[in-house]
Image: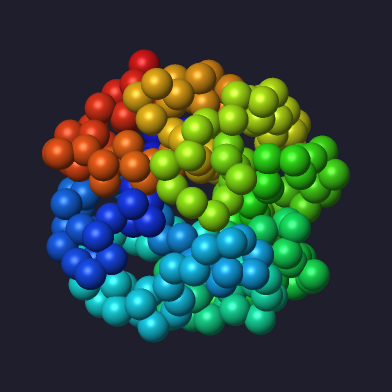
C-alpha cells in the first residue's frame, strides 16, 4: 500500500481551522481530527459541530480519531456527517463489532485504535471488521509528546497479523511521528502516518508533509 500522510490539526491554530486545513491540501491524503472529551483522555478538543463545519470547508477527507468514553454512542454520527474514516478506541468501545459495522454502514472506513499498553493479538479476530488499525505510539491526549519506541514491536506484530489475515487493512501510527521516527514506523509496517507537531509546528507545513512522505517511502 502506498504511503499516506494524515496531518493532525491538534497542533494547528484552533481559531483558524479552515486556513490551517488549506495549508496541507493538495499534499496530504487526509486531515486527522482528534476528538477528545476530557474523560477517556485528560484533554478537551472539539466535537461533531466543528467536524461538520470543517467538512464543508476542506477538500481533504477527514480522518476522525475519537478519544472519547462513549464511541458506541457517537461514532456513527461522525460517519453520517461525512467523515471518510472514523476510529474508535479498543479501551473505550463496549460493543466494538456493532460500532465498527455502524461506521461502515454509514459510508466511512472503520478504524480501531490501540493505546500503547493494549495488546494487538487479542483483537486478531476483529480484523475483518476493521479498515484501519491504529497503533498509538504515545499515550493519547496531547500533541508534541515523545515517540514511544517500546511500541515498535507491536507495530510489527500488527503488520504480521494483517498479512496473515490477508484482507486489506491499513496500519496507522499516531504519536511522535516525525522525520526522526517515521522511517522506523515504515520499517515496522505502518502505511498511514499521523503527524501533528511535525507538520503544524513547521514553517512550511506542505513541505513537512512531502518530506515525511519521502522518508516513509524510502
Ligand atoms: C494524540 C493525538 C495525535 C496528536 C499527535 O493523542 O491522537 O493525533 O495530534 O501529535 P504529534 O504528532 O505531535 O505527536
Ligand atoms: Zn490522533
Q: Quadrant of the C terminus?
A: top left
Q: Residue at x 68, y 40 (%)?
A: 116
Q: Residue at x 32, y 29 (%)?
A: 212
Q: Is residue 64 visible?
A: no
Residue 15 position, x and y percent, is 23, 69
Q: In the image, is residue 168 above or below residue 87?
A: above
Q: Residue at x 49, y 51 (%)?
A: 142
Residue 203 position, x and y percent, is 15, 39
Q: Could you say which quadrant of the image residue 90 lies in?
A: bottom right
Total labels: the figure holds: 0
Q: Residue at x 54, y 55 (%)?
A: 141
Residue 172 position, x and y percent, is 53, 42
Residue 45 located left or right of residue 95: left
Q: In the image, is residue 206 above or below residue 68?
A: above
Q: Is residue 35 visible?
A: yes
Q: Could you say which quadrant of the image residue 161 lies in?
A: top right
Residue 74 located left or right of residue 217: right
Residue 163 located left or right of residue 132: right
Residue 57 located left or right of residue 42: left
Amino acid at each position: 500500500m502506498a504511503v499516506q500522510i494524515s496531518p493532525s490539526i491538534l497542533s494547528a491554530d484552533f481559531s483558524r481551522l479552515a486556513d490551517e486545513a488549506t495549508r496541507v491540501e493538495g499534499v496530504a491524503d487526509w486531515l486527522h481530527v482528534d476528538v477528545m472529551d476530557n474523560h477517556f483522555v485528560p484533554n478537551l478538543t472539539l466535537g461533531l459541530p466543528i467536524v461538520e463545519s470543517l467538512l464543508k470547508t476542506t477538500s481533504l477527507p477527514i480522518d476522525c480519531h475519537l478519544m472519547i468514553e462513549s464511541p458506541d454512542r457517537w461514532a456513527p454520527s461522525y460517519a453520517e456527517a461525512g467523515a471518510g474514516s472514523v476510529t474508535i478506541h479498543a479501551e473505550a468501545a463496549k460493543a466494538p463489532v456493532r460500532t465498527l459495522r455502524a461506521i461502515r454502514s454509514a459510508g466511512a472506513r472503520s478504524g480501531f485504535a490501540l493505546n500503547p499498553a493494549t495488546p494487538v493479538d487479542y483483537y486478531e479476530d476483529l480484523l475483518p471488521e476493521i479498515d484501519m488499525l491504529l497503533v498509538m505510539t504515545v499515550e493519547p491526549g496531547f500533541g508534541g509528546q515523545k515517540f514511544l519506541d517500546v511500541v515498535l514491536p507491536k507495530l510489527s506484530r500488527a503488520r504480521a497479523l494483517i498479512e496473515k489475515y490477508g484482507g486489506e487493512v491499513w496500519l496507522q501510527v499516531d504519536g511522535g511521528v516525525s522525520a526522526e521516527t517515521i522511517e522506523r514506523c515504515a520499517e515496522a509496517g505502518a502505511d498511514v502516518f499521523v503527524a501533528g507537531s511535525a507538520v503544524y509546528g513547521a514553517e512550511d507545513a506542505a513541505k513537512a508533509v512531502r518530506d515525511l512522505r519521502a522518508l516513509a517511502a524510502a
